């Protein structure tokens, strides 16, 4: 018996990227994973999972090494190396499901069962048809891939385009062809695959159709309650959360909550989260309402944490201190504050201590996206307001000499002695300030980078 699937990568157009493959009936889900990798041309660098819908709270089929890392709210986590595809989809009455590859870039593949042939027998998977080139690994997901294709068309000589060419091993006069697909190459890779022997018997389920495979999770009701509780806590202010916890756990004082704050996060080195894949970001930071244009354009890694980003912004403007409190505010009004909740204007915020390890890439993800960086005085007054715009993102290459760099700057930034925009304007009226010492600023940024270990 064989199974025929059409598999298409979601959110990619002009051209769409899909493959039609046939697999042996004794393939496990891990075998199917390897067949998808070979048919499309992926490099098998990242983790994966099969599920009914993207990040659904129901069943997930994953490799055994990841079985202990399942979400508390999943109905069931299933071993992909010991689960036969044909048996599973028959028991679950599945016609469509998804394959998610690389949980950072989130390549979602829609899988449709087109045909089952009970008389056919094959020893390895076969690709019958396909369209579109496989996206590059770590290019930023569908949005990053579409942006890359657009760069090749609209700005073939742009620095970012050239960095992509270097990354792909293309010569400067070569172009990237998003339509490229060689079915013979795909089948040459697929011929190397065969079914993996399953060491334990597969338990058959007599139920024709149900929401959870093979067994019912006895904790499903508890999971629902916990999920609702976490959603409720998420929408509370810090003071509301403390009051709620004190009510739920009488006898536990709020002072005891910080007893476990001494833990170490092995993935954090200096001001970088090295568990995240770094992209090269170019951002423009502009002082709002200034009497003249005051901007700095910076190159930095997307995995710089927010507290480090605040330090970098101040250094770029010639300040070596970071005034407190400060905040990052997203376009929808959600804010990250550096001090206690009294400085938040509403409940939609996180204290900076809690999100210190969230990154610039977490705040800014798409070209043209903006966030505000504000320095406050108390709850109601903003002293200095800045707009941060993501101008471009790309990959670090061997030609990238610095991971952090001041690319250009314009305008004099308020000094520490100036307490308001009025003070700043008066200074301009009385004495036009000199051009900032950008050479000195660049050196301080290099020292700042050197003082914070950057491990990749």
Image: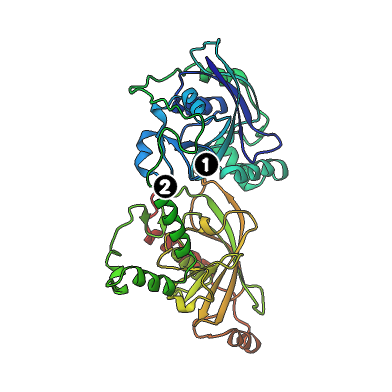
Q: Regarding mark 1 in the picture, which secondary structure is present there?
A: loop
Q: Is residue 34 left or right of residue 265?
A: right
In the rendered image, residue 273, in percent from the top left (x then y), is placed at: 41, 54
Residue found at the far front of this picture: 207
* Nearer to the camera, 209 or 25: 209
* Residue 19 in which image quadrant: top right
The residue beneath circle 2 is 220
Decide: is 248 above or below 47: below
* Nearer to the camera, 280 or 377: 377
In the rendered image, residue 300, in percent from the top left (x then y), is placed at: 51, 57
Give the spatial CA distance, label 2 vs label 1.
35 Å
Tell me, yes or no, if residue 194 can be seen here. yes
Q: Which residue does the image show at 52% across and 20% down from the upper left?
A: 189
* Nearer to the camera, 427 or 37: 37
Q: Which of marks 2 and 1 is nearer the N terminus?
A: 1
In the rendered image, residue 59, in percent from the top left (x then y), is placed at: 46, 39
In the rendered image, residue 433, in percent from the top left (x then y), is placed at: 60, 81
Q: Is residue 78 left or right of residue 108?
A: left
Q: Which residue does the image show at 55% across and 10% down from the upper left?
A: 119
Q: Characterize the local packing of mark 1: few (<14), some (14-19) or many (20 or more) Cα atoms within 10 angstroms.
A: some
Q: Which residue does the image show at 38% across and 50% down from the upper left?
A: 455
Decide: is 134 above or below 315: above
Q: Characterize the local packing of mark 2: few (<14), some (14-19) or many (20 or more) Cα atoms within 10 angstroms.
A: some
Q: In this view, does 82 lie to the left or right of 394?
A: left
Please tell me whether mark 2 or mark 1 is closer to you in this view. 2
Tell me, yes or no, if residue 46 can be seen here. no
Q: Regarding mark 2 in the picture, which secondary structure is present there?
A: helix
Decide: is 374 above or below 27: below
The residue beneath circle 1 is 138
């Amino acid at each position: 018996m064989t199974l025929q699937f059409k598999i298409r990568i979601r959110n990619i157009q002009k051209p769409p990227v899909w493959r039609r493959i046939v697999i042996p009936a004794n393939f496990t889900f891990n075998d199917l994973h390897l067949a998808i990798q070979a048919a499309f041309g992926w490099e098998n660098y990242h983790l994966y999972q099969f599920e009914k819908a993207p990040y659904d709270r129901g069943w997930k089929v994953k490799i055994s090494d990841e079985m202990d890392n399942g979400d508390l709210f999943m109905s069931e986590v299933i071993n992909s190396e010991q689960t036969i595809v044909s048996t599973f989809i028959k028991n679950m009455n599945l016609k469509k499901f998804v394959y998610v590859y690389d949980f950072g870039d989130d390549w979602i593949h829609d899988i449709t069962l087109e045909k089952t042939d009970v008389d056919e027998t094959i020893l390895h998977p076969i690709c019958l048809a396909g369209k579109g080139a496989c996206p590059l690994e770590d290019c930023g997901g569908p949005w990053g891939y579409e942006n890359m294709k657009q760069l090749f068309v609209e700005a073939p000589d742009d620095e970012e385009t050239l960095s992509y060419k270097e990354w792909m091993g293309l010569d400067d006069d070569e172009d990237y062809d998003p339509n490229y697909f060689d079915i013979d190459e795909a089948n040459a890779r697929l011929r190397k695959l065969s079914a993996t022997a399953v060491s334990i018997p597969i338990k058959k389920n007599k139920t024709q159709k149900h929401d959870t495979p093979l067994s019912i999770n006895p904790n499903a009701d508890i999971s629902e309650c916990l999920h609702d509780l976490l959603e409720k806590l998420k929408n509370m202010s810090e003071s509301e959360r403390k009051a709620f916890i004190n009510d739920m756990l009488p006898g536990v004082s709020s002072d005891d909550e910080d007893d476990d704050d001494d833990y170490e996060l092995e993935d954090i080195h200096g001001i970088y989260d090295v568990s995240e894949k770094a992209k090269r970001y170019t951002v423009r930071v502009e002082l709002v309402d200034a009497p003249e244009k005051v901007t700095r354009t910076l190159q930095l890694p997307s995995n710089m944490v927010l507290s480090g980003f605040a330090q970098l912004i101040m250094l770029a403007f010639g300040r070596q201190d970071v005034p407190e409190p400060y905040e990052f505010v997203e376009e929808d009004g959600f804010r990250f504050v550096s001090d206690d909740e009294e400085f938040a204007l509403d409940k939609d915020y996180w204290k900076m201590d809690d999100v210190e390890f969230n990154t610039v890439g977490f705040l800014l993800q798409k070209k043209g996206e903006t966030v505000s960086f504000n320095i406050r005085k108390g709850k109601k007054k903003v002293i200095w307001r800045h707009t941060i715009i993501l101008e471009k993102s790309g990959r670090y290459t061997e030609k990238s000499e610095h991971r952090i760099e001041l690319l250009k700057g314009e305008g004099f930034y308020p000094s520490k002695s100036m307490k308001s925009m009025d003070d700043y304007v008066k200074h301009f009226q009385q004495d036009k300030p000199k051009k900032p010492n950008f050479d000195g600023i660049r050196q301080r940024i290099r020292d700042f980078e050197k003082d914070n270990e950057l491990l990749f």
